[in-house]
Amino acid sequence: MSGPEETVPPGAVTFPADTKVLGAAEKAWTLGLCAECLGRLFGRLGHGLSNPERAHRLAVSLGRTVPPVETTGCTLCRGAFDRWETWIPRAVRAAEGVEWQRFACGSRWDPEILAREETLWVDVGTSHGESARGAFNREWGKRLETATGTLGGPTDPEIVFLADLPVGRVEVTLQPLYVRGRYRKLDRTIPQTRWPCRRCGGIGCDTCAGTGKTYPTSVEEIVAAPFLDATHGEGTRFHGMGREDIDARMLGRGRPFVLEIRRPKVRSIDVAALARSVAERSEGKVEFLEARAAGSADVVRVKEASPSKSYRVEFSVEAPVEKIKEAVSFAASRAIAQRTPTRVAHRRSDLVRERRILDARVVAASSGRFTLDLRAEAGTYIKEWVEGDGGRTEPSLAGTLGAPVKVEALDVLEIHDEE
């Protein structure tokens, strides 16, 4: 097979049009393809060239003209690569009212076109083809960058555009906005996250006065409120490094968490100022400390962490202080076998977990009431270790004393996540 040799200026991108490539191109030339689709058959060759440029290089080598057919008459893409003046405005309209600087884009194609393209690769004998979807996404991204002055790419997009070619519309997905920090809970009546009403499942009924909630508010709702207002988000997810009981306070430096804000329309927010407003809005019940911007990877780090924790427990029992100290020392020196506590057995698997109390000491005693400071491994049920839970925790302080013990108050003093 012969034809004019391609003339390439010094420093230009070369295109390796060998005999096999030219043979495949010759077969493809009669199939009614536009320059985009013809060049895309060899899209993995000549890095840096556009597909129409690849088609032109092949035309020079074969002594043919480009394009074989106009884009609108292409038997493969059906003019998809000739409608940028339609897709760009549609994308801009779809994102109206949304703040974004980084984006990614994709496309939905008729499966028949994509299947026919793969068959075409086999028929003409090319192993260098690029998919129509991949090429469309790349070229659309370049044009969106130019039209909007934003940055396209798969890394941390704030918005994702999807061109639905069969339907002719653009769909947008707003990526979540993340902030992280630590919360202190200074009220013994607030759960960590929204607690749906057990009777109606969150729909609203007489039991919950139509709120759909068991408790009026939560740490999640209190922390999220100023951020939802500022971002015009549609909801939140709360990712905490563990959780404390509703009637337990979270003191010290607070519990690490990540707040995920879904579908935010505004992203340029003053995270520190909004975090400071949490304490004021909650009348001192919740504080948001060490606030800063975060990403999805922070959610994984928070959820996978299992640090030890320090607690303060106030409990009552009829026993002398020396006996209490001996029992604490004895019970804390042994591995604990904890069966899933009675109070959570309805929602958790009935398992036996081995845990350890790492340190424990009595710090106050007065008239049958004692205060105990202790440090325990992650996942230790502190109330059950003190009270025994009917023998489901062994050994326990109550079991060692041989007397009933009642926890009066529990505080989490520290999450040792930085050790």
Image: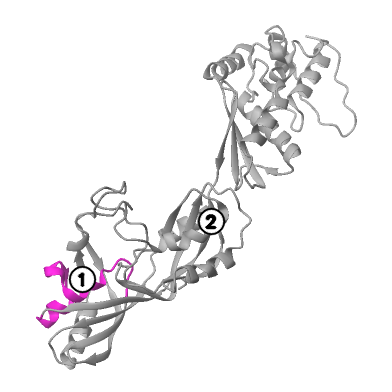
Which residue in the structure is indicated by mark 2? 229
**Residue at far left of view:** 402
The residue lying at 77 percent from left, 29 percent from top is 49
Residue 133 vs 320, above or below: the answer is above
**Quarter of the image where one finds residue 373:** bottom left
Nearer to us: label 1 or label 2: 2
Dot 2: few (<14), some (14–19), or many (≥20) neighbours within 10 Å? few
For the residue pair 312 and 193, the one nearer the viewer reads as: 193
**Which quarter of the rendered picture does the N terminus lie within?**
top right
**Quarter of the image where one finds residue 166:** top right
For the residue pair 27 and 281, the one nearer the viewer reads as: 281
Residue 62 vs 80, above or below: the answer is above
The residue lying at 49 percent from left, 54 percent from top is 260
Q: Magenta residues, as a range?
A: 376-403
Residue 19 relative to residue 351: left or right: right
The residue lying at 49 percent from left, 71 percent from top is 280
Q: Which tag, 1 or 2, sits closer to the chain's start?
A: 2
Residue 345, how many percent across, how many down? 19, 58
Residue 377 relative to residue 235: left or right: left
Residue 170, how many percent across, how many down? 60, 30
Which residue in the structure is indicated by mark 1? 384
Going by the numbered disc 2, the residue's amino acid type is Asp
**Which quarter of the rendered picture does the C terminus lie within?**
bottom left
Decide if residue 370 is in sight here: yes
